[in-house]
Amino acid sequence: MFKDLKALGKESLIYGLSTVGARLLNFILLPFYTHYLAPADYGIVAAVFSYIAFLNIVYHYGLDQAYMRHYADREKAFPAAMACLGVTTLLLTLLLCAAAPFWAAAGGIGAGNARLVYYAAAILLLDTATIIPFADLRMRHRALRFAGVRTASIVINVALNVVFLAWLGLGLESVFLANVISSAAAAALLAPEFRAAAARADLPVLRNLLSFALPLLPAGLGSMAVQVLDRPIMLHLSDTASVGVYQANYRLGIFMMMVVTMFDQAWRPFFIERSHRPDAAPVFARVLTYFTVGGLWLWLGLSFFIGDLARLRVAGINLIHPDYWSGLGIVPVVLAAYLLNGVYVNFLAPVIIAKRTGIILSVTLAGAAVSIGGNFALIPAFGMYGAAWALLLSYLAMAVMVHLRGRAFYPVPYEFGRIGAAAGLAAACALPAFLLPFGGAAGLAVRAAAFLAFPLLAWHGGLLLPEEKEAALRRFSRLLPAGRKTGAL
C-alpha cells in the first residue's frame, strides 16, 4: 500500500510543483489587479473569466476524460479526438464572434464591451487545442513536460499583465490580450505532441470516445456552474464593484484550490491504473484519510493567517488594496468549500471505475441546482457571504451524493471514523482562534498555537495508526544526518 501511495505522492508533487508554481505566479496578479484595477473593472474581468471557464466545458465536452479512459487505443484515439474537437471548436468560435454585442449585453458586461467576447473566443479556441495533448502527457507520465509547458504559459501571462497594465496603462482589455498570447505560447510549446493528430480519424473509436464523453458534458457544466456562476449571478443581483471585491477574496482561496488541483491531476491516472488490483479499495480509502487530515491542517493555517497576508505591507504598500478588505471574512468558507471539493474528487473513483458517468451527471446537476438556488436565496440577504456559503453547500451536497451512489458499484472501506475525528479536532483548534477576542501579537500567538496543536494532538491523541507513526519516523530518520541518527539511537 505505501508503495502505491508513494507513487501517487511523487506524481502529485511534480504536477503540484507546476500547479503551485503556476498558481503562485498567477496569484501575484491578484494584488497587482487590486492596485491597478478599480473593483468595478475587476468585477468585469471576473465575470468574463467565469463565462470562459463555463464555456470551456462546452468546448471540451469531456473528450479529454474520454481519451484518458481509452488511452489503450492511443494511436487511433488521439487523431479522432483532435479532429472532432477541431470541427466543434471552429463552429462554437464562429457562433460567439458573429453575435459578440449580443453576448456581451446578455452577460451583463454591456454591449460596449463586445471586444471582450472576441478575446474570450480566442482564449477558448487556443485552450481547447491543447486539452488532448495535455491529457496525453498525463497518461504517458510526462509530468515534467506537462509542468514545464503549464508554468511557461503562466510566466508569460504574468509578465505581459505587468507590462500592459503597469507600464503601458492599457486597462482591463489588456488582461485578456495577455491571456490570448500565453495560451498561444502553450499551443506552440506542445507542437511536437500535435504530430500524432496527423493520422486518419477512426470513426468506431470516435464513437466510443463520444459515448463516454457526452454524458460528461452536462456533468461538467453542472460542476463548473458550482464554481463560477456565483459571479454572474452576483453581477445581476448587485453591481460590478461587489463582484470585484468578492473575486479578489475568493482568489485568496487559491492555496486550497492548488492542493485539490494537483491531487486531481495525479489521482485519476492513479486509480484508473490500479482499479483491477485486489488491494485497490483499501488504498483508495487510505488516500481519502490522508487527503482530509492534511487538508484540514491546511485549512486551519490558511484561515488563521490569510488576513495577515492580505494586510501585509511591502515597500509601504498593502499586498491587497484596502478597498478589497471588506470581503476577507468569506475566505475560510471558500477554503472549506474547496476542501469538500477535494473529498468529492476522491469519491469519484468508484463511479469512474464502474463507468457509471450518468451518476456524475445527476450529482453535478444537483450541485448546480443547490448553487444557483443558494446564490439567488442568500446573496440578496447576505451579499458575498451568501455566495460563499452557497458554494460550500453545493460541494457538500455533491460529495455526499456521489459517495452514496458510488458505493453500490465499487465499495471502498473509507475510514469515516478517523475522518470525523480529524474534523472534530480541527474544529476544536479553530474555535479558540476565531472566538477569543485577541488582536495584534496576542491574537497571532493564539492562532499559531492552535495551528501547531492540530498535528501534536493528532499524533498523541490516537488519530494516527501505529504503522503510520512508524513509517513517518523512518522517513524522518532518513532525512537526518548520519551523526544525528546515531545519537538518536
Image (tube, rainbow, N blue to C red):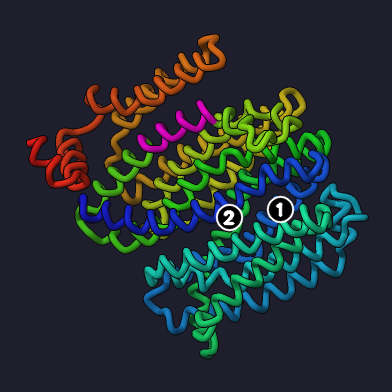
Say whether residue 79 is visible: no
Query: Judging from the image, what secondary structure is the residue with disc 2 in?
Result: helix
Which of the 4 image quadrants contains residue 215?
bottom right
Comes first in the chain, label 2 or label 1: 1
Image coords of residue 435 (percent x, y): 52, 12
Q: Residue at x 79, y 59 (%)?
A: 174
Image coords of residue 15 (percent x, y): 43, 58
Query: Judging from the image, what secondary structure is the residue with disc 1 in?
Result: helix
Extreme-front residue of the structure: 315
Say whether residue 257 is visible: yes
Q: Amino acid at mark 2?
A: Gly
Image mark count:
2
Q: Is residue 299 magenta?
A: yes
Q: Residue at x 28, y 27 (%)?
A: 458
Which of the 4 image quadrants contains residue 315?
top right
Quadrant showing the C terminus? top left
Q: Is residue 243 left or right of residue 259?
A: right
Q: Amino acid at mark 1?
A: Phe
> Residue beneath label 2, please?
220
Which of the 4 image quadrants contains residue 128?
bottom right
Image position of 219 with respect to 429: above or below: below
Mark 2, other Cα within 10 Å: few <14 / some 14–19 / many ≥20:
many
Image position of 3 with respect to 200: above or below: above
What stretch of residues is rendered in magenta? 293-305
Image position of 164 with respect to 197: above or below: above
Q: Are marks 2 and 1 in contact (CB under 8 Å)?
A: no
> Residue beneath label 1, please?
49
Q: Nearer the viewer, residue 427 or 248?
A: 248
